[in-house]
């Protein structure tokens, strides 16, 4: 046997083994590559769940705290704070409630819930007799969220506070500011009724007529509310020595269908009494002492004569209109003989 053949014979098993190992490496290469492609690090956690508004409102305090702590508008943190504050409010936790509402305003000033939080804080301060803080937050609302519907409620509350403090000039300013911003809107109806009645109570008949006329321009006014505004306007005309205009209004009311019987009876009685009244006013307009600001001081002689009805005689609709008209304030009854 030649030398070459002997070498090949000796190494043949080794060559066969090498070929086998190479074949196995080719077979397992894809598996090894796939394993090598897997990252060594632990996989990242899943993104946080984005809850719907309905789901958030149903969550418990602990979960609401977690969402609020995320400080993310995308995750609805402002809504979580608002719901959290409401839960604290319902459970009597005043301090936590206040802090949650304040956090909404400070952290998310441009969010739609911020003006709502202002009103909630005002209510909280009112309940706790914190008058200065109530006025402060309502003024903040008026300054920073002027066009929001919440501002209308805020201005109304401010006007009533000013009335309570006997700051009549400021009361009228708040009424006028609200009317200017929200002119013609149905939400203005309660405030306009209150404003008109305040002018009527303070014997500023021109302004009272103006406010009642502005009320009558609002198309959403109900039948009962329209009748209330007409009664108030007629009362202003009577006191302002314009009986003909008042009589026309009473006749208009009496022709209106589907009115509550009490309103019709009041208009009918007013018409009869007006026909019996003196043709000249017992108190002339120039005899009234003008007050500082938009109103006027009550005329004591007129009150003694009994020509002006008591403020405890509001006209109130009944039946289906009662709920809609709630909060429209009082409308004075006609001027008595």
Image (cartoon, rainbow, N blue to C red):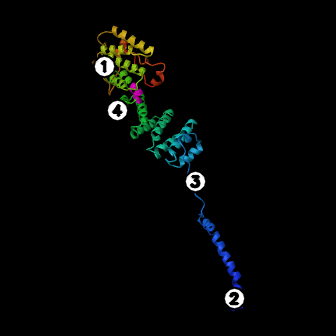
Task: Label 1: state its secondary structure.
Answer: loop
Tell me what residue is drawn at x 53 percent, y 41 percent. 53
Tell me what residue is drawn at x 69 percent, y 88 percent. 5
- Residue 68, compared with residue 128, is above or below; it is below
Looking at the rendered image, the disc whose residue lies closer to the viewer, 4 or 1, is 4
Disc 4 target residue: 180
Residue farthest left in this picture: 286
Task: Label 3: state its secondary structure.
Answer: loop
Q: Which residues are magenta?
A: 186-194
Is 301 situated left or right of 66 in this image?
left
User: What secondary structure predominates along the stretch shown in magenta?
Assistant: helix
- Residue 46, compared with residue 7, is above or below; it is above
Query: Is residue 165 shown to the viewer in this render?
Result: no
Query: Are dots 4 and 3 in contact, CB under 8 Å?
Result: no
Task: Label 4: state its secondary structure.
Answer: helix
Looking at the rendered image, the disc whose residue lies closer to the viewer, 2 or 4, is 2
Q: Label 4: few (<14), some or many (≥20) within 10 Å?
A: few
Spatial CA distance of label 2 from label 4 is 114 Å
Residue farthest bottom in this picture: 2
Spatial CA distance of label 4 from label 1 is 29 Å
Residue farthest top in this picture: 276
Disc 3 target residue: 46
Looking at the rendered image, the disc whose residue lies closer to the viewer, 1 or 2, is 2
Q: Is tag 2's residue or tag 3's residue first in the polypeptide sequence?
A: 2
Query: Is residue 54 shown to the viewer in this render?
Result: yes
Q: Nearer the viewer, residue 239 or 56?
A: 56
- Residue 266, compared with residue 291, is above or below; it is above
Disc 1 target residue: 288
Residue farthest front in this picture: 1
Q: Nearer the viewer, residue 95 or 58?
A: 58
Task: Label 2: state its secondary structure.
Answer: helix
């Amino acid at each position: 046997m030649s030398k070459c053949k002997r070498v090949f014979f000796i190494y043949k098993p080794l060559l066969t083994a090498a070929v086998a190992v190479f074949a196995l490496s080719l077979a397992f290469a894809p598996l090894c590559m796939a394993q090598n492609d897997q990252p060594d690090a632990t996989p990242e956690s899943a993104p946080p769940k984005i809850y719907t508004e309905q789901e958030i409102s149903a969550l418990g305090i602990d979960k609401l705290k977690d969402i609020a702590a995320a400080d993310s508008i995308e995750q609805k943190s402002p809504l979580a704070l608002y719901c959290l504050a409401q839960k604290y409010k319902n459970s009597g936790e005043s301090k936590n409630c206040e802090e949650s509402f304040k956090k909404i305003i400070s952290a998310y000033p441009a969010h739609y819930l911020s003006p709502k939080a202002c009103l909630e804080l005002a209510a909280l301060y009112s309940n706790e007799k914190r008058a200065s803080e109530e006025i402060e937050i309502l003024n903040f609302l008026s300054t920073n969220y002027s066009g929001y519907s919440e501002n209308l409620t805020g201005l109304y509350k401010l006007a009533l506070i000013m009335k309570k403090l006997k700051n009549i000039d400021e009361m009228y300013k708040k009424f006028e500011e609200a009317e200017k911003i929200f002119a013609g809107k149905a939400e203005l109806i309660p405030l306009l009724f209150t404003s008109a009645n305040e002018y009527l109570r303070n014997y500023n008949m021109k302004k009272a007529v103006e406010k009642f006329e502005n009320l009558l321009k609002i198309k959403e006014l109900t039948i009962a509310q329209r009748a209330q505004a007409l009664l108030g306007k007629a009362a202003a005309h009577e006191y302002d020595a314009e009986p003909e205009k008042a009589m026309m209004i009473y006749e208009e009311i009496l022709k209106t269908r589907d009115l509550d019987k009490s309103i019709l009876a009041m208009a009918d009685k007013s018409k009869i009494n007006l026909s019996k009244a003196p043709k000249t006013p017992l108190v002339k307009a120039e005899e009234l002492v003008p007050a500082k600001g938009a109103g006027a001081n009550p005329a004591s002689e007129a009150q003694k004569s009994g020509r002006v009805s008591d403020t405890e005689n509001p006209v109130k609709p009944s039946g289906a209109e009662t709920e809609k008209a709630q909060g429209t304030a009082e409308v004075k009854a006609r001027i008595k003989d």
